């Protein structure tokens, strides 16, 4: 595949996102109260009506718009439940596809349904390597904002591996977009900045809080002015969190939910980050940020809808070097012979 092919794929996926955006916003205008209706529960997540609307658009678009010369396997929550085709052109054996495309139709559904914060359409496109295809194989990423009711402007971000990223802002549906500059924070420490450890649900908060406390103690922030120079923001959307890093709002985000030990961790596997949630990390990386696992290794989770992913995002390499060792020590410290 040539660079021109990858750039074309980026434009095509951007067009798909535009279609999803238009359908979801139109549906909200017609039936906002019904979008939160649960229509299914899969091993990956709870499926709401707003998710189903986006999924329908995606399936129709791949059927009609994706180039037949580029056979693709689609990975998306809800496909197994609906017994839909997973390859396009339909019926193509997976072994004969050249791409694997992973999609999160609406990431941040809960906040979007309550009109609290934007949700995001997320897509990552990788060269097909069968079951060996991982997050590290993604070569094109696109993410598009689904804004709250009072907001008409929305951003679409995209990247091709090794060729940088682009951010386009539109002031409304069907209005032309304008490319804008956006870059992660270049801060060299965490003072007066936002740093968040994801803890969205009641279970597991004690474990996550202990890790975070030990992390701040390692960095000598704990006890210094009451820690009042560091703030947090619990954005219940992995795509939204990546955007906050890209835009320069946040300096570090750690999602350690898959590491919660014991029964609680096992029960909450569904409520962790999965590969489709973090499939746009490439955009942050192309803008100079860092995304890795909690021990500093590249993310190599398979492109599926069920594997729990623990990840850490840093706005820049300086912050990664500053925090990486402290986080590793916080995770490895033991009490009474047991982790934390």
Image (tube, rainbow, N blue to C red):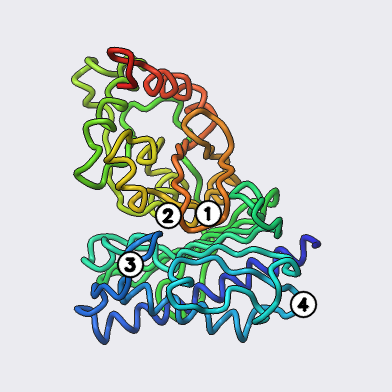
N-term mark: 4 or 1: 4
Q: Are marks 3 and 1 in contact (CB under 8 Å)?
A: no
Q: Are marks 2 and 1 in contact (CB under 8 Å)?
A: yes
Q: Are marks 3 and 4 in contact (CB under 8 Å)?
A: no
N-term mark: 2 or 4: 4
Q: Nearer the viewer, residue 339 or 178?
A: 339
Neighbourhood count class around disc 4 (C-alpha, 10 Å): few under 14, some 14–19, many 20 upward: few
**CA gap, disc 4 and disc 1:** 25 Å
Residue 155 lies in quadrant: bottom left
Q: Quadrant of the N terminus?
A: bottom right
Task: Kindly identify which residue carries mark 4.
Answer: 69
Is residue 194 at least partly visible in the picture?
no
How far across and down, in percent of the image, does residue 335 sit? 29, 14
* Element assignment for label 2: helix
* Element assignment for label 4: loop
Task: Kindly identify which residue carries mark 3.
Answer: 41
Task: Kindly identify which residue carries mark 1.
Answer: 280
Q: Residue at x 55, y 62 (%)?
A: 102
Q: Residue furthest right?
A: 2
How far across and down, in percent of the image, does residue 327 sit? 41, 24
Is residue 84 at least partly visible in the picture?
yes
Q: Are marks 4 and 1 in contact (CB under 8 Å)?
A: no
**CA gap, disc 3 and disc 2:** 21 Å
């Amino acid at each position: 595949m040539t660079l021109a092919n990858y750039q074309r794929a980026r434009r095509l996926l951007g067009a798909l996102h535009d279609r999803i955006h238009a359908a979801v916003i139109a549906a909200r205008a017609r039936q906002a109260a019904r979008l939160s209706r649960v229509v299914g529960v899969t091993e990956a997540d709870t499926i709401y009506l707003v998710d189903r609307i986006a999924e329908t658009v995606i399936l129709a678009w791949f059927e009609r718009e994706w180039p037949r010369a580029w056979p693709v396997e689609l990975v998306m929550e809800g496909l197994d439940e609906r017994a839909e085709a997973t390859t396009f052109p339909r019926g193509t054996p997976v072994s004969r596809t050249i791409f694997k495309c992973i999609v999160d139709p609406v990431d941040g559904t809960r906040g979007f349904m309550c009109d609290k914060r934007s949700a995001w359409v997320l897509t990552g496109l990788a060269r097909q390597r069968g079951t060996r295809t991982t997050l590290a194989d993604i070569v094109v990423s696109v993410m598009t904002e689904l804004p709250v009711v009072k907001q008409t402007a929305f951003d679409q971000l995209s990247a091709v591996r090794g060729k940088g990223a682009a951010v386009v802002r539109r002031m409304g549906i069907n209005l032309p977009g304008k490319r804008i500059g956006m870059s992660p924070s270049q801060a060299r420490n965490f003072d007066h900045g936002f740093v968040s450890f994801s803890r969205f649900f009641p279970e597991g908060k004690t474990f996550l809080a202990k890790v975070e406390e030990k992390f701040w103690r390692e960095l000598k922030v704990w006890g210094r002015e009451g820690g009042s120079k560091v703030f947090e923001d619990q954005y219940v959307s992995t795509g939204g969190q990546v955007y906050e890093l890209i835009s320069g709002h946040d300096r570090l985000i750690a999602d350690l939910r898959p590491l919660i030990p014991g029964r609680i961790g096992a029960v909450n596997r569904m409520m962790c980050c999965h590969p489709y949630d973090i499939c746009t990390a490439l955009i942050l990386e192309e803008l100079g940020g860092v995304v890795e696992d909690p021990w500093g290794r590249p993310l190599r989770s398979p492109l599926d809808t069920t594997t729990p992913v623990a990840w850490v995002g840093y706005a820049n390499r300086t912050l990664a070097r500053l925090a990486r060792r402290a986080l590793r020590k916080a995770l490895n410290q033991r009490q009474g012979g047991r982790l934390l």
